[in-house]
Image: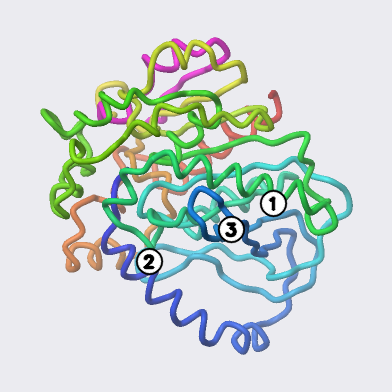
Amino acid sequence: MPKFITLIKIAAATTVFGSISWAGYELTRPGYDGNIGIDFGSAYAPARGEDVKFAIWYPAQSGGRAVTVGGNGVFYGTPAGSKAPRQAGQFPLVILSHGAGGNAGQFGWIASELASAGYVVVIPNHPGTTSGNASAEAAVRVWERPADITAVIDEITANPEVYGYMDTSDISMIGFSAGGYTALALSGAQVDPDKLQSYCDESDHGMSDCAFLARYGVDLHAYDLSPAAQSLKDPRIKSTIAIDPGIIETITPESLENIDISMMVLNLGEKDTVPIGVYALPAAELIPNAEHSFVPDATHFSFLAECTDRGADILAKEGEPDPLCDDAGSRSRAEIHADIAQRIKDFLTQS
């Protein structure tokens, strides 16, 4: 669950601007002539006592206003049609869970690919672990993230007059990093609270999570982590894709062995380069209907949007500790994205 401190500041500034001027700004945008629509919704999450906001990417027709979603000085955004007319019919639903410190706007690259292939993609912003609304204490309460997804599905299924174009009999889940844990938990994986409590005792697991918690004075031994042991499975989810899943070492083997849906597990990088904190091959081997593969030339951050030419310099000047713009091999991030997108589409087609 890496924490993207600089990214939070950039996204927070963008959010404030958008809340003041988005309506007038959209009126001045040109019309959209494409097939990818973007809209937004919200769901009340009982576990939090507040709303969870989410983005909706969907197959569209020409119309609405041309916008760019998620762009800033560090990352490129993704073009889409704001409130573009939907294509006719019902479409399989894919829900994507971002990593800690991330946000829905970072994943337009995969959401637009899936929308153009005939899927609706819903991406919630997890309160407490999203850009502009994040804290170390909230990151510890990992069990709240799966509950967010269940709340979103509840909202969608309870309001067919609004979301009837989503086929709720065909729901798949994608999760990255902390979102990868979220996807596993919704599939039936359960955390061993003792392992979670001792997670930062002797190792950083090749990630920045423990350093982040220490920086803000969070000692895992001071928290009641027993709620992490509960089953958070949502039986409405029919298949799952977990990408570099966080806290994978804390998941109980018994719960992995009992997962009964099809699953694809991806690690970003080669077998000897993936950080142990997200190295998921041993876990995948315990899941009866799981397939696992590595994505060469990738790093943990290759699942984020493509960086601008100035992105790495901006991050360095802001003191960002994680190499968010770095990939590992000869392929560009765009080429890595194309590889990952094809794997995801192939899996969803077969599931």
Residue 185 location in percent, x, y?
Answer: 49, 30
Q: Residue at left 70%, top 62%?
A: 37
The nearer-to-camera label among 2 and 1 is: 1
Q: In terms of image quadrants, where is residue 243? A: top left
Magenta range: 275-296
Between discs 2 and 1, the one toward the N terminus? 2
Which label was assigned to residue 155?
1
Closest to the observer, 114 or 185: 185
Between discs 1 and 3, the one toward the N terminus? 3
Mark 2 sits on what residue?
A: 132
> Where 83 sits versus 102, above or below?
below
Per the model, the C-alpha gap separating discs 2 and 1 is 24 Å
Residue 26 location in percent, x, y?
Answer: 64, 82
Q: Residue furthest right?
A: 88
Closest to the observer, 152 or 207: 152
Q: Indicate the amino acid at tag 3.
A: Phe
> Where 300 sits versus 304, above or below?
above
Between discs 2 and 3, the one toward the N terminus? 3
Label 2 neighbour load within 10 Å: few <14, some 14-19, many 20+? many
Q: Indicate the amino acid at tag 1.
A: Glu
Mark 3 sits on what residue?
A: 54
Quadrant containing the C terminus is top right
In what element is the residue under mark 1?
Answer: helix
In what element is the residue under mark 3?
Answer: strand
